[in-house]
Image (spheres, grey):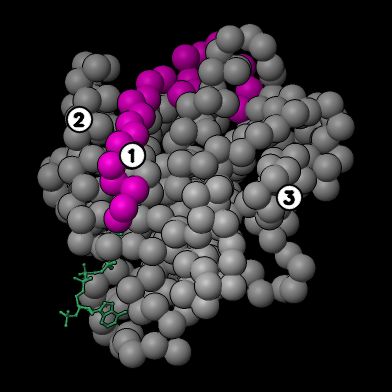
Amino acid sequence: MVDTTDEWITTRTGIKERRILRTPGKATSDMGLEVVRQLLEKTGTKPEEIDLLICATVTPDTTFPDTANTILDKAGAKNAFGFDINAACSGFLFALTTGAKFIESGMYKKVIVIGADKMSAIVDYSDRSTCIIFGDGAGGVLLEPNTEGNGVIDAILKSDGSGREFLHMKAGGSLKPATPETVANKEHFVFQDGKPVFKAAVTGMVTTVNQVLARNNMTTEDIDWLVPHQANMRIINSVGDMLDFPMDKVMVNIHKYGNTTAGTLPLCLWEYESQLKKGDNLMLTAFGGGFTWGSLYLKWAY
Ligand code: UT7
């Protein structure tokens, strides 16, 4: 489709495969629904027991209503409410922090947090600078009260709206509603100026990881797993190097899924779940459009 090579993609990004949701009529909510079904089955939870569902996504089924509502309806979670969070590739971090607060406050007992994006819906497959990167994917977690000190311990989240010029979608919002011209000009696709995003991503992730470590009187040696957003293998390697963190403790699956935006962090947790032990210290970190970024420290609870 575009002028590229496997060699360029592999060496510049580390990506070998991407998943595309091709079934006609299927959208982000259908991936989210599958996540909910698997979580409920695995934990022996009934849909009616869910209190809240937060869906991090930049590819909602429709601008409104939000995708969380649609997932809840499809899952038969009749007693829950839900909402979406739009923080691009940092969406899962923002949503997980928010969901944990609803548990910590004692307000709710079962909160599902999903990161889901059907990026193929907003990728221009004639733009080689983005189409080789993004894929479709979703993952999620069920949060419940914990009295053993496990769960989300701390997070530092950041936003800098001046970064929006480097990574955005030009049209389709209230600033520039859809017209025949915006469609003809391909303004309903992801636009990315990769180099400034790359640099800001490395700095933002390393800085906030160090801030979270310092605030919790920890060093990288106290962390069992680093869980970085999967945007580019070179970014992951740079973050690992700058933190002096051994790569065998860094979760990596970008080669299989590419950049699934809000999906990358929960997909990593899902993929490495069998290697995790109760009490393991995990540091999640992400950077994305907005700019948005941050790091989150959690203790694995099972
Ligand atoms: O997840 C949200 C946050 N996003 C990120 O963190 C992504 C950050 N950015 C990146 O990962 C990288 O900047 C990209 C993978 C997007 C691009 O890699 P790069 O090393 O920054 O390449 P570049 O954009 O500077 O382009 C270098 C060259 C250019 O050619 P010239 O001008 O040197 O002749 C591009 O036209 O590579 C060319 N190029 C390609 N060539 C073959 C760009 N894309 C491709 C391609 N195949 N797919």
Query: Against 203, is 271 above or below?
Result: below
Marks 3 and 2 sit apart, C-alpha to C-alpha, by 35 Å
- The answer to whether residue 228 is seen in the rendering is no
- Residue hosting label 2: 210
Secondary structure beneath label 3:
helix
Neighbour class for label 1 at 10 Å: few (<14), some, many (≥20)?
few
Q: Earlier in the sequence, mark 1 or mark 2?
A: 1
Neighbour class for label 3 at 10 Å: few (<14), some, many (≥20)?
many
Q: Residue at x 72, y 56 (%)?
A: 30
Magenta stretch contains residue 164: yes
Look at label 1 and name its amino acid.
Gly
Marks 1 and 3 sit apart, C-alpha to C-alpha, by 31 Å
Q: Residue at x 13, y 45 (%)?
A: 242
Q: Earlier in the sequence, mark 3 or mark 2?
A: 3
Q: Position of residue 172 (x, y in %)?
A: 56, 57
Secondary structure beneath label 2:
helix
Q: Is mark 3 within 8 Å of ligand 1?
A: no
The residue range painted magenta reads 143-166
Identify the disc placed on residue 33: 3
Look at label 2 and name its amino acid.
Asn
Look at label 3 and name its amino acid.
Leu
Marks 1 and 2 sit apart, C-alpha to C-alpha, by 22 Å
- The answer to whether residue 61 is seen in the rendering is yes
